[in-house]
Amino acid sequence: MTDSLTVRDNRTGAEYDIPITDGTIRAADLGQIKTADDQPGLATYDPGFVNTASCRSSVTYIDGEKGVLEYRGYPIEQLAEKSTFLEVSYLLIYGELPTKEQYDQWVHEITYHTYVHENVKSFMQGFRYDAHPMGMLMASVGALSTFYPEASDIQDPANRHIQTVRMIAKMPTLGAWAFRHAQGKPYIYPDNDLSYTENFLSMLFKMSEHRYDADPRLAKALDVLFILHADHEQNCSTNAVRSVGSSQVDPYSAVAAGIGALFGPLHGGANEAVLRMLRRIGTKENIPSFIKGVKDGNERLMGFGHRVYKNYDPRAKIIKKACDDVFEVTGVNPLLEIAQELEKIALEDEYFVKRKLYPNVDFYSGLIYEAFQFPPEMFTVLFAIGRTPGWLAQWGELIQDKDQKIARPKQIYTGDRTLTFTPAEERWG
């Protein structure tokens, strides 16, 4: 027997049988429910899309109740421990792990395309000295579409591949240059003898030395952070990439929209809010009064709870482990002790346990970024570099999905109707 939902419309007494597939019904099937043939059919109202699926996807699986995150079926814990960011990028975009030959070719292509046109450098140098790095990244990624006009031929798989390679390759270059720009330092060109993450660290921090040698523990930790941020289902920025991409625009423009969404404090800026909270607490001794303030509604516990996860965010566990490697190199961030004590209390306190407020990915990531000596305004740039392969995987899936149409949500109109217009000379008398 086919799974279905029987709906009775109490306005008319009519009953409707609506098929259920993969735990969902098609919103369009509700359109047949109407009070008269000349009236609009029923629609759903769902601000923020909290219970509306906009696509079918095989990129990322999340079970929020159990704290499970998988890329293409592979647990995030295994990928973070045993894989590399570029291998994970290939997996996300092409749906399977690469062979040795495929991986070597993939790394070669991305390494080859790390340089950007000199005019992009001039473009970025034109920003004010205090321009936000995220604004610079968003603008420069969008500008790449003018350097590669052929990118608009999105139906050609070979063309999609080269634009994907270019974007993953050039994001660290653009991000590092935005960082240097804010410091008034000269831009550093890529060093293609280095790995992806080592090259990024070189472009960020190299000064007068002949070659910047990144500590392998720092390079590995940053690679893990990129893996953890590589995709996360239909979040705000991924939804933005898909929504803008549904107009069949080039991928640079679609990803620039994703960067714009990530710029918002409710999406990419949460780890900065965690640092502000930890600094405000100041010492371990102040934690009990802070916890009381949270319960009384006078304080906000940042870095706990998640729209999707109702369990411990699996990424938070991995980042917590990465903290040890980073602080071994940089020295322990004094805020770490406060964070660990705050987590311990929150995980044992019935008030937070009952509300399923567990640490999320943002709780420890800011501490690591700060240990790297990144200013808070760079945190979302790092997030964007890691998220790029996920955005591109989702965009590529969208382009090849025959079910997809240009994004055009319904609205419920609440304004005035049929008003009579009075010319200005009469209104103003």
Image: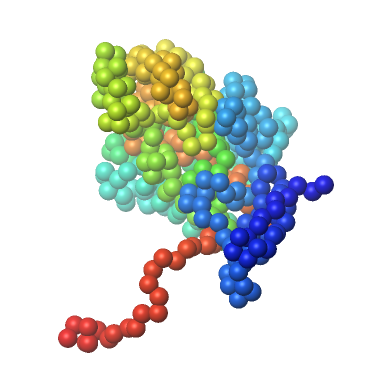
Residue found 22% across the figure and 87% down from its top: 426
Residue found 53% across the figure and 26% down from its top: 311
Residue found 27% across the figure and 86% down from its top: 423
Total numbered labels: 0
Q: Quadrant of residue 166?
A: top right
Residue 160, visible in the rendered structure: no
Q: Is residue 416 above or below residue 136?
A: below
Residue 53, visible in the rendered structure: yes
Q: Quadrant of residue 78?
A: top right
Q: Quadrant of residue 366?
A: top left
Residue 229 image position (x, y, % from top left): 51, 33
Q: Residue furthest right?
A: 1
Residue 276 image position (x, y, % from top left): 29, 29
Q: Is residue 124 above or below residue 81?
A: below
Is residue 232 or residue 429 the one in the foreground? 429
Q: Is residue 213 left or right of residue 112?
A: left
Residue found 70% across the figure and 44% down from its top: 22
Residue 168 image position (x, y, % from top left): 54, 41
Q: Residue furthest left?
A: 429
Q: Is residue 387 above or below residue 343?
A: below
Query: Which scheme is used to colour this image of the protein?
Result: rainbow
Is residue 208 or residue 25 the one in the foreground? 25
Is residue 277 or residue 353 the one in the foreground? 353
Residue 429 image position (x, y, % from top left): 17, 86
